[in-house]
Image: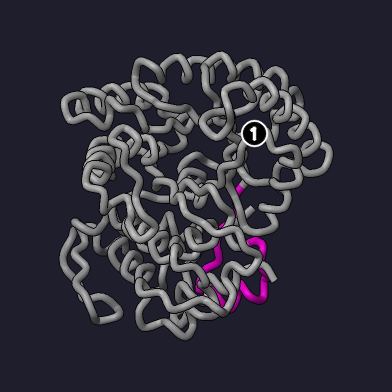
Amino acid sequence: MRHFGHIGPEVRQRLFHREPCEFTADSPARLLSAALGATLYSPAIRPQLADDIVKQTGRGVVSMVLCLEDSIDDGDVPAGEENLVRQFADLAERASGADLPLLFIRVRTPEQIPDLVRRLGPAVRLLSGFVLPKFTEERGIPFLEALTVAEAAGGRRLFAMPVLESPELLYRESRVETLEGIFRAVDKYRDRVLALRLGVTDFCSSYGLRRAPDMTAYDVQIVASVIADVVNMLGRADGTGFTVTGPVWEYFRVQERMFKPQLRRSPFLEGQAEELREALIEHAMDGLLREITLDQANGLLGKTCIHPSHVLPVHALSVVSHEEFSDAQDILRPERLGGGVLRSAYTNKMNEVKPHRAWAERTLLRAEVFGVANEDIGFVELLAAGIPG
């Protein structure tokens, strides 16, 4: 699979200076953690789940979470498990793992992990891992231990994606201690932890809050403070950190005319109004686009998504610009190892080699999985090219 693999090679050639790389579920963890992109969640009880997965693959989705937790009623969990087993068997008959997104199951209890791996049987080859809810050191270790057991029994590498969403993480008096515990847990199982996910909706619920469609998570100060501390302690670029993904965007409008020409201009992308009319049609998209940009500015990569219309904007804004790529390459040239300052090839900024090195390394990793746009290609062109005809 690859990002933008759902569009034709001739279009990709026009869009990209360097095309996104191909990867599989067996690729190195460092590559996969960067390649998750817009991770689309779907309730595990959907009766046509296998069809949905195949359909979304054709629309550019590369990672999905099939949810047995908050997205379904407590009483529907057994039916959801049974449905997952049936749908995975269906998928195994219809497609190879290379033809499908990275698939994860969001469970409620540690015991579900080995049980589901056993029940999936040979179809477990399509599973990339499990999403672990309300993760703290105390609650998380049993999940990670269960994952280790299930991995050995299933004979397949399985990743964990803990969700950081517990009240202990939100409350000031327990936040640092909770983060230290989370680090101890995920560091111990570092080889199995693909990424850490932020559960901002749960954070808001602890205070009876809900952000409006024109507000991002970063406009809600109590949430922004948690994101900052999570990145501070768990997202460092010194080799101890993990990929931290962006929070869910809750708003969407179910319309077949999504991304069609009639929409009014986007104030967030001022100056591109005419092109934008060809791509964006939802005012609510302005908040999403702003939040994706702020995710990246604050050290997050990828995003939890609950609607297919969110996937393409996340991916389009994840593509590395030609200017970013040029700067990163210049900074990482072997002859620059000693440091120094140089003017960018675009002659509009200073590149200071030592302070910008970690940024450059992360940028080239993102360039590998999302590609590098041609000089004259921006977000609008990438978004428009990826919209299914």
**Residue shown at the point (43%, 30%) measured from the top left:** 162
* Number of marks: 1
Q: Which sits in the foreground, 138 or 286?
A: 286
Q: Residue furthest front?
A: 208
- The boundaries of the magenta stretch are 5-23
Q: Is residue 367 visible?
A: yes
**Residue shown at the point (51%, 76%) measured from the top left:** 263
Q: Position of residue 353 (x, y in %)?
A: 21, 62
Please give left or right for residue 338 compared with residue 60 in the image. Answer: left
Q: Position of residue 299 (x, y in %)?
A: 31, 50
Q: Is residue 198 visible?
A: no
Instruction: State whether residue 251 is above or below residue 133.
Output: below
Task: Please identify the quarter of the rendering in which residue 189 is found.
Answer: top left
- Is 367 contained in the magenta span? no
Mark 1, residues whose alpha carbon is within 10 Å: few (<14), some, or many (≥20)? many
Instruction: State whether residue 372 is above or below residue 70.
Output: below
- Is 16 contained in the magenta span? yes
Circle 1 SS class: loop
Q: Position of residue 309 (x, y in %)?
A: 56, 59
Instruction: State whether residue 371 is above or below residue 17.
Output: above
Which quadrant of the rendered structure holds the C terminus? bottom right
**Residue shown at the point (35%, 23%) measured from the top left:** 136
Q: How is colour applied across the structure in the image?
A: one colour
Please give left or right for residue 246 compared with residue 155 in the image. Answer: left
Q: Which residue is mark 1?
A: 44
Please give left or right for residue 117 compared with residue 336 in the image. Answer: right
Q: Residue furthest right?
A: 93
Going by the numbered disc 1, the residue's amino acid type is: Ala
